[in-house]
Image (tube, rainbow, N blue to C red):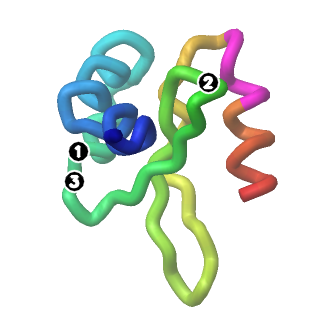
């Protein structure tokens, strides 16, 4: 059985979300060094990198406006 988070984090799915909800700065999320946070509860991603044991978010969440607060809270709890 495949991992649903791997399907959510597929490059095609990320590009689709960027086209749908992203802004011009969201293309930075396509950098291979970018890490992604997502959850099956919300369609969208938060791009981040870790530095000095701290997550540094790369811009706004890429998700529907209705999912923003839930995705951000899930990332915060992560």
Q: Which residue is mark 1?
A: 30
Considering every residue shown, the one lying at the far front of the view is: 1
Residue 64 percent coordinates (x, y): 57, 13
Tag 1, which secondary structure?
helix
The residue that label 3 is drawn on is: 31
Pick the front one: 17 or 41: 41
Nearer to me, 9 or 27 = 9
The foreground one among 24 and 70 is 70
Above or below: residue 70 compared with residue 20: below
Main SS of residues in magenta: helix
**Gap in angstroms between the C-alphas marked 1 and 2:** 20 Å
Quarter of the rendering containing residue 40: top right
Q: Nearer the viewer, mark 1 or mark 2?
A: 2
Residue 27 place in picture, x, y as percent = 26, 37
Earlier in the chain: of badge 3 and badge 2, it is 3
Residue at 56% x, 65% y is 56
Q: In this rendering, is residue 30 above or below 71?
A: below
- Of labels 1 and 2, earlier in sequence is 1
Which residue is found at the position 33% from the left and 24% from the top? 18
Question: Magenta segment range?
Answer: 66-70
Give the structural element (helix, strand or loop) at label 3. Answer: loop
Mark 3 neighbour class, 10 Å CA radius: few under 14, some 14 to 19, many 20 or more: few
Q: CA distance from mark 3 to mark 1?
A: 4 Å
State the image coordinates of residue 15 (x, y, percent, origin top left).
24, 26
User: Dot 2 surroundings within 10 Å: few (below 14), some, or many (20 or more)?
Assistant: some
Residue 63 vs residue 65: left or right?
left
Crowd around label 1: few <14 · some 14–19 · many ≥20 (10 Å): some
Q: Is residue 77 above or below residue 71?
A: below
Q: Quadrant of the N terminus?
A: top left
Q: Are marks 3 and 1 in contact (CB under 8 Å)?
A: yes
Residue for badge 2:
42
């Amino acid at each position: 059985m495949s991992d649903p988070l791997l399907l959510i984090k597929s490059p095609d799915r990320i590009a689709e979300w960027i086209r749908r909800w992203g802004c011009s700065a969201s293309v930075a999320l396509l950098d291979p060094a970018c890490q992604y946070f997502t959850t099956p509860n919300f369609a969208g991603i938060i791009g981040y990198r870790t530095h000095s044991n701290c997550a540094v978010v790369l811009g706004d969440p890429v998700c529907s406006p209705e999912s923003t607060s839930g995705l951000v809270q899930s990332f915060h709890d992560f």
